[in-house]
Image (tube, rainbow, N blue to C red):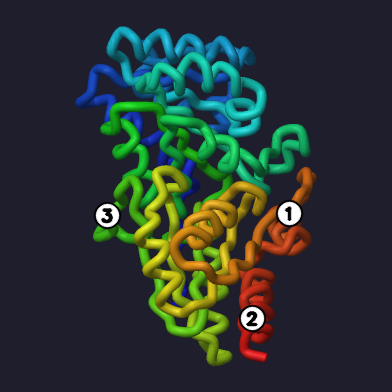
Amino acid sequence: MTLAPGKAPRVAFGETVAELCKTDPRIVVLDGDLGSSTRADIFENAFPDRFFQMGIAEQNLLGAAAGMATVGFVPFVSTFAAFAVARALDSIRVLIAQPRLNVKVVGGYSGLLAGMTGKTHLVFDDLAIMRAMPKMVVIAPADEEETRQAVRAAAAYDGPVYLRLTRQASPLLFDASYRFEIGRVTVVRPGRDVTVFATGTQTVRAFQAAEALAAEGIDVHLVHVPTLKPLDADGIVEAAQATGFVITSEEGSIIGGLGGAVAEVLADRFPVTVKRHGLADIFGESGPDDLLLEKFGISAAKTAEAIRAFVNARRA
């Protein structure tokens, strides 16, 4: 099955939040001098009077958003994931999460493929950090369609949200019939041999891997986990029970990320071996997307290789 091309999630974010602004006077966007990269500039061009350029001052960026939330606005904070989660984490923790303010932190350029911005601009542990944050909802959409629905869901949710977006365009895994829901997993491809959990745009590569493996007689039960918190524990257990074999796949750290989250649930409710596939205990580097995906082992082909090796080892 060939997937249709889609827009980059960052573009879908900019377009959707601008669309929401037409009917919700509470929505504002605060930017950390990266609008042309995160595509917050789409909102800026449409609603310049509700766009706030805060410059390269991330702690102040988050603090200003918190203040605006206290007087009834719904602020979307737009910057790179590395700057929001690593540089301004204390502002998120103290000013937004602890008082449970209605701020949406949009971490753009997340994961490995950040347009050759350099290792200082890459963050792989953002999901681990943010899902450990009390009162924080954590969402990692797979494609353009899910990003649009996730932005709408984040705007409607009363409380802090971390929305993890990637830079590059992703093929469309979902169409308009899909319904995103905070805290719910989705079975993308039913199968009988091995359960694969994936999140973010890595789910697209996992789907491509599953389709290739089907030709080899390996039937993958692929489950997309767009919400790392709250986690759909019932859905994870049900999917794991479908095959009894579990592997997770993510464009992020396997320490504390999706792999850790799934392993925690299954250790409590359905003890089974969980193979974690993703980025190990490493920092990133710059390079062309395809080469980085291959080098760090999360391309569709490398994902298929990891699933194949796991299944064959379990069958032996």
Badge 2 local density, few (<14 within 10 Å), some, or many (20+)?
Answer: some
At a point 49% along the width and 77% down the height, the residue shown is 244
Q: In which quarter of the image is residue 160?
A: top left
Q: Quadrant of residue 283?
A: top right
Give the CA separation, mark 2 to mark 1: 19 Å
Q: As displayed, is residue 190 above or below residue 18?
A: below
Residue 308 is tagged as 2
Q: Residue 76: image x %, image y %?
A: 41, 24
Q: Residue 194: image x %, image y %?
A: 51, 78
In the picture, the quarter occupied by the C terminus is bottom right
At a point 61% along the width and 47% down the height, the residue shown is 256
* Helix, strand or loop for disc 1: loop
Decide which of tag 1 and tag 3 comes sooner along the chain.
Answer: 3
- Is residue 39 visible in this depiction of the protein? no
Q: Which amino acid does label 3 sit on?
A: Arg
Q: As displayed, is residue 85 above or below residue 271?
A: above
Q: What residue type is labelled 1?
A: Ala
For the residues bearing labels 3 and 2, Cβ distance under 8 angstroms = no
